[in-house]
Structures are given as structure tokens and as C-alpha cells.
Image (cartoon, helix red, strand yellow):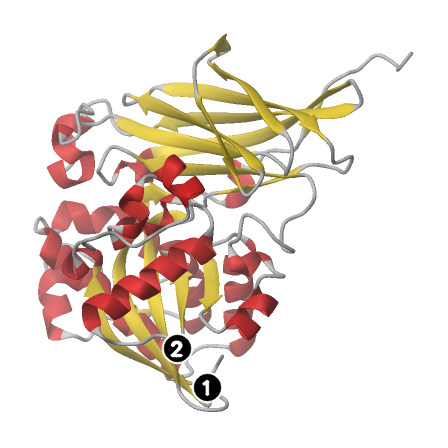
Amino acid sequence: MLGANGSRTYLLMIQNNAEARASGGIPGALAVLSLNEGKLTLGEQSSAGELGVMSPPLRVEAEQVQIYSTRIGKYVQDVNLTPDFPTAANAAQAMWETKTGQHVDGVISIDPVALGYILDATGPVRITDTELIALASAGLPTELTGANVVETLLSDVYAKIERPVLQDVYFAGVAQEIFAALADGRGNTKGLIDGLARGAAESRVLIWSGLPVEQSVIAEYALSGAIVGPSISPAQFGVYFNDSTGAKMDYYVKRTVQLVKECPSEGYEQTTVRITSTNTAPANAATSLPAYVTGNGIFGIPAGSVQTNIVAYGPVQAHVETAKLDGKNTDFAPYLHANRPVGVLAVRLAPGESKTVEFAFGKIVQHTEPNVTVTPTVQNVNDVIQPTQVAECSPAT
């Protein structure tokens, strides 16, 4: 895949966690990576806006369309409404090739947090492009580090640069500067490998190959971002977030996810998935934050508020039985994806507001310890995933 037997090209998607999608964030910035005998070069750069709309939409598996709509096959910024990265990457590859005429061998996804891990290894990267320097004069840093890249790309750029097209220019330029540092072999190799490994462990680095032989190997690892297959443990749950505000407010949302292992029932395991979300934006967010960040009510969500579709997956063959919002039973949308039960519930948070959603999964046939994967956000994943809670149960009679 590194071009040992001839040049390879990959579509690079930089997922923007400020606007949540199931596998991380909106793939706003796009670029082509070329690899030849291990040498890395960054080629054509673009954005989701530039790529435009697929008309007619690409055909996507009916089960996933039912849950996530035809938008998966219509807009590149929505291909990852599904948490199944092979589906998202396949769609992104097809869109890129249809719109540009350029074939890519696969898709690589990374987010700004993982870019921070890379910068920790390469050391600070000074911005040298004259256009970027001009944009940075609005108050953005001229040197990017592991400590400032997330805040710069997911918050400050919106406050300092008003026009979305110039925000895209800044994103693309920053990506070029960072990958130029990588291509130059800057920094220490062990640190780089450790950073990429950490990004992969946190689902911030995902890879898909369009070559079936290679993809069959990738599918064995979490790096694949698949929701079904050999990389999925028997009692694995998943919690994913999809923004429906049409804004960049997820930078301000803090979340925790916890599994509660309930008492068995009729020989089956029972597990509750508890998700708590808090909107930490300032009380005056509607006026103090840029309209592009708040969405300015574009989809009927009051400026400063955040609305998220919370999607919970259970293990194969289990059932999603009930949902609660702040301790009270509530309606939710139940689905099935690859024989895994799925529950979806929309939650709206005003500035300072916190809400807890609980999905109860029953009829779990797997008698192994449960674990959970989550959408990578701006938070440290260890702050999001809480230790599993075990209910006190009476001895079986």
C-alpha cells in the first residue's frame, strides 16, 4: 500500500470534529496522497463544497439508507453519517472519481486531533505559504503545534475567517504544510509511529483499500472502521454522533458514554448504554459565536443550541428494547444494520444544558464482557468512555 510495486494514490479525508459525523466529523477537506516506494507527496486538494452534489445519488445499501437517508450517496460531507467506514470510503472514492475523473486506490481518514499527534512527533510546523500567512494575519497562529492545532482548526479559524471558502483554503493549506513536514522526514520516527498508532486506536485514523485482497487484511483490525466483521468483538456496542444543527457547535459538546451491565434475564445478558451530553458553549453563544459556528437557526435549531442524532448499536442478534431521556421513557427509532440492533434518538441542548440518554439492550446471546466504541470527538477518548458499571444481582435460584 506504500507503493512498493508501483505508485499508489489515496483520497485523504480530514474529518472535522466540530460538526459530528458517526466516524468523527464532516469530511470538509480533501486531498490526494501519492505514495511511491514509501515516498509521500500531497497532490490535488479540494473540499466537500467544491465536489458538489451527486445527482442521481450513488446506490447505497437499503438498510443504511433507511437509517441515514440517501445523503450518504449524495454529498461527500455525509458519506460518514454511517459509522461503517468501508461504506463511507467506498462512496467517497466513487464521488471523487465521478467528479474529478481521477482514480484513487483507497481512502485514508484522519482528524485534527490525530494531526496533533503527528505534530507532537514532527515538532512545530511554521506556515510559509503567502496566502496562509495573509489569512493568519487575522489572528491565527503562524506556527502549528500539537498543542494548538485542534483549537486552531476547529474553533479559531471560524472566529477569525468569516468566509467559508477561505476557511477551506486555510484547512487545505495547513494540511499541505503538515504533510510536507512528514514527507521531509521531520521529527523522530518512533514518535510518529506512536502518534499514528494512538490515532488508529482512537478511531481517528481509518483506512480502506479498493483492492479486495488488501481490504480483507485491513478488515481484521479496528483501523478498518467497520461495524461488522473480524475486527468486531463478540459483545461490542457502538455509540455514534451525527450533527443535525448544520453547524460547528460540536466543539463545545462534552460527552460521556458508559455501559451498565444489568442482571441477566431468561438466560440472556442485558446491557444499558448511557450517554450524557453537555453543551458547554457560553450562555450568549447565539451572539458571541460566529453565525457559521452556530448555524444561525438554518435548520430550525436556535442559534447556540446543538441538536445531535445519537445512534447506539448493540451486538449481533440482540434487541434494542427501550430508550430513556433523563430517566423517563421516550420514543426512539429502532433499526437493524448487519444484524446488529440500532437505536436512534435526537437530543437538543441549549447552552449550559445537559441530558442523559439510556438505551436498553436485551436478548444478548454473547456471554463475554461488553465493550464500546464511540465517535472520536475533540475530547480525550479516555474522558468519554467510562468504566463499565455492573449491577448488583441476586444469586440465581
Between 103 and 354, the one nearer to me in the picture = 103
| Mark 2 vs mark 1, CA separation in Å | 16 Å
- Relative to 65, is 73 above or below? below
* Point 77% across, 16% down: residue: 392
Local secondary structure at mark 2:
helix
Q: Disc 1 marks which residue?
A: 3
Decide: few, some or many residues near mark 1? Use Cα within 10 Å; few <14, some 14-19, many ≥20: some
Please state if 4 lies on the left or on the right of 363 as rendered. Answer: left
* Point 14% across, 54% down: residue: 139
* Point 34% across, 54% down: residue: 15
Quadrant where the C terminus sits is top right
Decide: few, some or many residues near mark 2? Use Cα within 10 Å; few <14, some 14-19, many ≥20: many
Local secondary structure at mark 1:
loop
Between 266 and 377, the one nearer to me in the picture = 266
**Is residue 234 visible to us here?**
yes
Counting from the top left corner in percent of width and height, residue 97 is at 27, 70
Between 300 and 306, the one nearer to me in the picture = 300
Counting from the top left corner in percent of width and height, residue 251 is at 32, 40
- Relative to 336, is 272 above or below? above
- Toward which corner of the image does residue 395 lie, by quadrant? top right
Q: Which mark is residue 182?
A: 2
State which mark lies toward you, 2 or 1: 1
- Toward which corner of the image does residue 81 lie, by quadrant? top left
Residue that sits furthest to the right in the current view: 397
Counting from the top left corner in percent of width and height, residue 383 is at 52, 38
